[in-house]
Image (cartoon, rainbow, N blue to C red):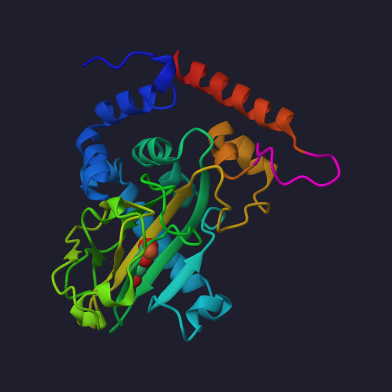
Amino acid sequence: MEIGNWSSTAEVNEYYRQARRLGIESNVLELELFGFTIIEPERASPNGLGERLTEATYALLKREDAADVALNTFEKSNVDGRHVFHLLKKDPVFVEAMLNPVVMTLARLATGERGRLHATVCFAKKGLAKPTLLHCDATECPAPMPAFGHLINISYLVTDYTLANGTLAIVPGSNRWCRPPTPIEQPKWFGGVNDDIAIPVIAKAGSIVAFNGNTWHGAYPKTDAAADRIHLSYAFSKAYVHPGENYDDIPDSMAEQYGPEFAQLVGKYDWKGWRTEGPNFERQLTGEKARMAARALAAE
Ligand SMILES: O=C(O)CCC(=O)C(=O)O
Ligand SMILES: [Fe+2]
């Protein structure tokens, strides 16, 4: 059917039309029904984005000191291997990947016009690695969680993901269960009883794997010591969620360079975060006007 400019669905009309134009309409449905989707490299990483992300990611891993990240040495960490956080300033291609229309369409459909960037993280596993216990990314949200995910994780695979290199494990449909898994509900390979509950994500480098904050997921053990296993996760959350990362170090010059959509995602137009001056709704309105003007310009 033709999607009109219906006032009662003003937040989704254009994004849904965009999903159609981008050829990811079925991915939107898969996210809804199964709680996850895989977008093949041709659609996920157009115009050589995959190659540029690979190059930038390996340079990043070489340049940064793993010891600077607390989680890399935290003994109780659920995720084995190395993390690099806070990617936006580390290479322009990490911004490009966030603003990729495929990513923005999924992010806005899931988190709305005032949704925020929540976190950016590179997960890198070399050699052997322990499995990651099934969990939901909507942390701090007590059960029952809302029926919709208030967070979406949109991840670019930098390497191929296979069972042997410890791919992501996903429990299809768990997005509807509105609660995180209990220890006994872990697969047997985690000490639980649900041996066949999770499925492995098998996908090529350059693909996007997206799942919402309610979806139970983890990672299989990495048994192939030779192949690297790396993905870049962009998480977005609804406006009422406290973002994981703090973007107050993003300079205004970057917001000017990348435009009002970027500025909004990193909180430049937030009305919250006040001190004595109180809520700043003017700032929010400024952002809305700037985004509308930028869209009108782009549509010309
Ligand atoms: O790669 C892993 O082991 C876990 C990844 C994960 O939980 C995530 O991307 O949210
Ligand atoms: Fe996760």
Where is residue 17 drawn, in percent x and y?
A: 31, 23
Q: Looking at the image, which residue is at 25% across and 52% down? A: 207
Q: Is residue 236 above or below residue 189?
A: above
Q: Looking at the image, which residue is at 58% across and 77% down? A: 68
Q: Looking at the image, which residue is at 26% across and 81% down? A: 190
User: In the image shown, does 151 or 222 lie closer to the viewer?
Assistant: 151
User: In the image shown, does 254 or 285 lie closer to the viewer?
Assistant: 285
Q: What main secondary structure does the magenta stretch of the protein show?
A: loop
Number of on-image labels:
0
Residue 228 location, quadrant:
bottom left
The image quadrant in which ligand 2 is located? bottom left
Drawn side of residue 5 relative to residue 191, left or right: right
Q: Is residue 77 above or below residue 28?
A: below
User: Which residue occupies the extreme right position in the image?
Assistant: 276
User: In the image shown, does 150 or 160 lie closer to the viewer?
Assistant: 150
272 in the magenta segment: yes
Quadrant location of the N terminus in the rendered image:
top left
Where is residue 13 drawn, in percent x and y?
A: 37, 22
Residue 226 location, quadrant:
bottom left
Where is residue 130 drawn, in percent x and y?
A: 30, 82
Drawn side of residue 199 relative to residue 238, left or right: left
Q: Is residue 151 above or below residue 19?
A: below
- Magenta span: 268-278
